[in-house]
Amino acid sequence: MDTISKILDMIHVRSTVYFSKSVLAPWGMEVIEQPGMCRFHLIIAGSTWIRLSDGSEEVQLHAGDYVIIPRGKSHVLSSEPGIVANSTHNVPGPEPLPVPMFEPRPAPEQSTQLLCGYFRISSFAPDLIPEQLPALLVVRASGAQRPEYVANVRSLIQHELDTMGAASLIILNRLTEVLFFCALREWASQSFVEGGALAALSDQRLQRALSAIHDSPDRNWTIESLAQVAGQSRTAFASGFRQAMATTPMGYVTRYRTLLARRMLTETSLALDDIASRTGYSDTNAFSRAFRRAIGTSPGAFRKSSRT
């Protein structure tokens, strides 16, 4: 598995589509800030401008384009630049909508049709995703590395919006999750080649160390043994790793083991001693202590809460 795939595989995302609407110019809609809420907008038809409410960025989006606002900043969607919003949206708010707001009827040809929602992200990769994503992550219909693939996903979304049959909302949620990973793949690929946030991961020595951690999380890793895998001195490896990953090698090992433990506690019925062994701990007590330090609760309590 390539490095980008391994990073993206660390992310669990759940999409919620809550808004599909056609609007006629002039119009403006403000989406209220919710820190940590990753929002998205897909332009089904027409065009729109999106600007961050703090004025730091403004771009135009056309049919087929979509944008992700990773950190939930307040923003305005409008038919023209600078239009004052005449409506506000705060979803999910203190009282989430019982059902999404959809307009199944055909839209006028001159209207703009939007599909909006948000992602709940469980991210492991420290300080890479989502912290280093741009404030507006835009994927153009014509600029994607695999435009036909993204277009096919959008066609499926359009079909569900047109028909709105049984389970359409579930299908829309899953299809927009695919668009999320398409956007991250586009960004990550560009970051590698253009010297962006992930460029340091193109270092083959670092990739060898990361692959070793991912492939054998149960091994008794030390900085020295990881440096040997990377083919570097201890000092050079530790320094380069921290610069690229914004954490120490052993900090990364602990975080990755914690991620695996969380998945196993949530998705399997493995006994705690089996999970401890698979994540590199000598016994259940050592595993429980490390897990509590990282998560703030015991493995047993975490498993119980994740299944309620």
Image: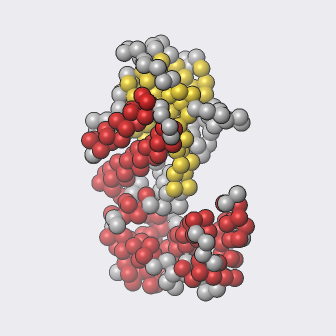
Judge whether residue 45 can be spotted in this image: yes
Q: Is residue 208 left or right of residue 38?
A: left
Q: Nearer the viewer, residue 160 or 179?
A: 160
Q: Percent from the top left, x then y, of residue 185?
A: 37, 51
Across and down, in percent, residue 167 comes to 51, 40
| Residue 163 position in % (x across, y down) | 43, 30
Residue 186 appears at what percent x and percent y? 35, 48
Q: Check the picture and name the quadrant holding the C terminus.
A: bottom right
- Quarter of the picture containing the N terminus is bottom left
Residue under the image location 41 percent in, 54 percent down? 197
The reply to whether residue 50 is visible in this rendering is no
In this view, 273 is above or below 66? below
Query: 169 or 150: which is nearer to us?
Result: 169
**110 in relation to 211, above or below:** above
Residue sitting at x 49%, y 77%: 217
Query: Residue 222, relative to residue 50: is it above or below?
Result: below
When asked about the image quadrant of residue 244, the answer is bottom left
Question: What residue do we see at 51% from left, 81% from top?
Answer: 218
Seen from the viewer's position, the closer of residues 282 and 192 is 282
Left or right: 90 as drawn, with respect to 129 = right
Residue 259 lies in quadrant:
bottom right
